[in-house]
Image: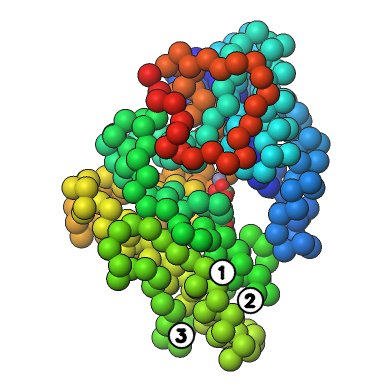
Amino acid sequence: MRVLGIETSCDDTAAAVYDDRLGLLAHRLFSQIDVHQDYGGIVPELAARDHIRKLLPLVDAVLRESESAPAQMGGIAYTAGPGLIGALLVGASVGRSLAWAWGVPAVGVHHMEAHLLAPMLEERPPPVPFVALLVSGGHTLLVEVERLGRYRILGDTLDDAVGEAFDKTAKLLGLRYPGGPAIAAAAADGNPRRFRFPRPMVNRPGLDFSFSGLKTYALTTVREHGLDRQTVADIACAFQEAAVDTLVIKARRALEQGGHRRLVVAGGVGANRLLRERLGRVGKDIDAEVYFPRPEFCTDNGAMIAYAGWARLRAGERQSLAIDVHPRWALDTVPPID
Ligand code: KG4
Ligand code: ZN
């Protein structure tokens, strides 16, 4: 079965074609970074309007690149949530309308489930069961996955998501949006011994996170030491160390507590080099396999949406024809796949 995937939940417009016999045939993305740059964060209305402009040309491009005629399509998948309502509605409207025109089924998929499934597109896909660490701009989750479609939340953030903490800290350091890559780049010139940030909540039992304190700590450090180039690099370095260390400690705890041997890491922050290195090391330490998507499939993309939609369509899932989105949608309430 061949599935068109559409992603418009936030600030990336993306489309992809996945075929279960031939693999991923095409994927394209248009990033709205330039649209939102001057505002230091995403402006929802501008995001929705830009998705309207970019989505159909991207769909056209992936259909051409994958040499897919509408008659070859088995279905369409689009992100139905969580995300920005106006942005989600663009993908849902286009996805449902094309499906209607082509006479194929469409499924609205959960954005975080799609992130979680992204490593399935790689050469060495993770078998279930596993623990997933989902780290993005909106979420920080540790999830136990016994079977695909059944998700038990082990840990969540009590305040900011880790990607959000990267973005907010970057902003107060005067770095570009999005903050994750900007902090990682600045940190490369930083002295890791100059500042030491706290590791929030690691001394408490449990698997929840809290990241808003790190941003406050960064602010206090800026007030005390200023914003010269070296200080920015040193703060970026200390922040990244603390954020990564916190994720690594909790991911290790989740694996050990549940007796799990496999960890899947996904979501935008999963592109972070330091996080990938440190989790790789933990895997060796405790004899667990660690699976990541390639960095470009850690951040938002259409390929993961096509794959998640394919998994549901293949299992026979059918949804009503209503154009329905869920800006807030808990991962552990998605229907099972089967
Ligand atoms: O998954 P994603 O593309 O979108 C959401 O679903 O939120 O994640 C975006 C988040 C942003 O907060 C961005 O700053 C962060 O992922 N990010 C990174 C890196 N690349 C993206 N954070 C740390 N290091 C990176 N290399
Ligand atoms: Zn995402």
Q: Amino acid at mark 3?
A: Phe
Q: Which residue, given by chain and number where applicable, does mark 3 sit on? A: 195
Q: Residue at x 27, y 45 (%)?
A: 262
Q: Position of residue 314 (x, y in %)?
A: 45, 16
CA–CA distance in space, label 1 to label 2: 9 Å
Amino acid tagged 2: Leu
Element marked by disc 2: loop
The residue that label 2 is drawn on is 173
Which residue, given by chain and number where applicable, does mark 1 sit on?
183
**Image height of 76 relative to 87, above or below:** above
Is residue 17 found left or right of 276 in the rendered image?
right
Circles 1 and 2 in contact, beta carbons < 8 Å: yes
Quadrant of the displayed image that contains ligand 2: top right
CA neighbours of label 1 inside 10 A, class few (<14), some (14 to 19), many (20+): many
Please provide percent x and percent y for residue 157: 45, 57
Q: Secondary structure at mark 3?
A: loop
Return the disc, 2 or 3, that comes first in the chain's sequence: 2
- Specify whether 244 is left or right of 181: left
Of callouts 3 and 1, which one flags the residue occurring earlier in the amino acid sequence? 1
Residue in the picture at 39% in, 73% down: 199
- The reply to whether the residue tagged 1 has its Cβ within 8 angstroms of ligand 1 is yes
Name the element at disc 1: helix
Relative image position of residue 170 (x, y in whole percent): 61, 70
Distance between the alpha carbons at the discs numbered 3 and 1: 15 Å
Q: Residue 64: image x %, image y %? A: 68, 23
- Residue 169 visible here: yes
Q: Nearer the viewer, mark 3 or mark 1?
A: 3
How would you rate the neighbour count of disc 2 (Cα within 10 Å): few for under 14, some for 14-19, many for 20 or more? many
Q: CA distance from mark 2 to mark 3?
A: 15 Å
Residue type pointed to by label 1: Ile
